[in-house]
Amino acid sequence: MNNTNLSKISQMSTTRLPLDHFVSGALASTIATLVLESNKNSQLSNIDVKKLLKNGAIAGIAAASAIYAANSIAKGKYLEAGFGLVAGVSGALLIEKTLK
């Protein structure tokens, strides 16, 4: 890792990209939802696709906004971090209300 990506806070970097973590969060949520639903119902064909999409989108937004906020904190931009968290919560609530 080159020194331009190192934070003033030890063991933190700014090399994480929010979109990468959106995809990771969405995939992790989809996997977790599939596992939890398969425990309830042995037939995966009965799993609600809308629930998978909703959980994936919310987890993706949560992961991306958390990484954005963490990058901002690592740079010492605390107000930016707060805005990132507010945007993440707002996005997650919007998806929750939209995909009922």
Image: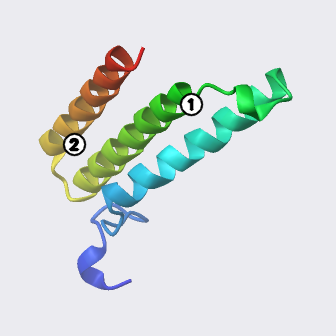
- The residue pinned by badge 1 equals 49
| Residue depth check, mark 1 versus mark 2: number of the one nearer the observer | 1
Residue 93 picture location, percent across and down: 32, 20
Is 18 left, or right, of 59 in this rendering? Answer: left
For label 2, the crowd category at 10 Å Cα-Cα, with few meaning under 14, some 14 to 19 and many 20 or more, is many
The dot on residue 81 is 2
The dot on residue 18 is none
- Residue type marked 1: Val
Q: Secondary structure at mark 1?
A: helix
The residue nearer to you, when weighing 27 against 5, is 27
Is 6 left, or right, of 59 in this rendering? Answer: left
Q: Quadrant of residue 10?
A: bottom left
Q: Secondary structure at mark 2?
A: helix
Where does the N terminus fall, quadrant-wise? bottom left
Q: How many marks?
A: 2
- Residue type marked 2: Ala
Q: Residue at horizontal 51%, vertical 27%?
A: 50
Residue 100 picture location, percent across and down: 42, 14
Q: Residue at horizontal 16%, vertical 36%?
A: 83
* Distance Cα–Cα, label 1 vs label 2: 33 Å
Residue 20 picture location, percent across and down: 39, 60
Q: Residue at horizontal 28%, vertical 57%?
A: 74
Is 50 left, or right, of 75 in this rendering? Answer: right
For label 1, the crowd category at 10 Å Cα-Cα, with few meaning under 14, some 14 to 19 and many 20 or more, is few
Q: Residue at horizontal 58%, vertical 46%?
A: 28
Residue furthest out toward the bottom = 2
Q: Which mark sits nearer the N-terminus, 1 or 2?
A: 1
Residue 80 picture location, percent across and down: 14, 44
Q: Quadrant of residue 3?
A: bottom left
The residue nearer to you, when weighing 66 against 53, is 53
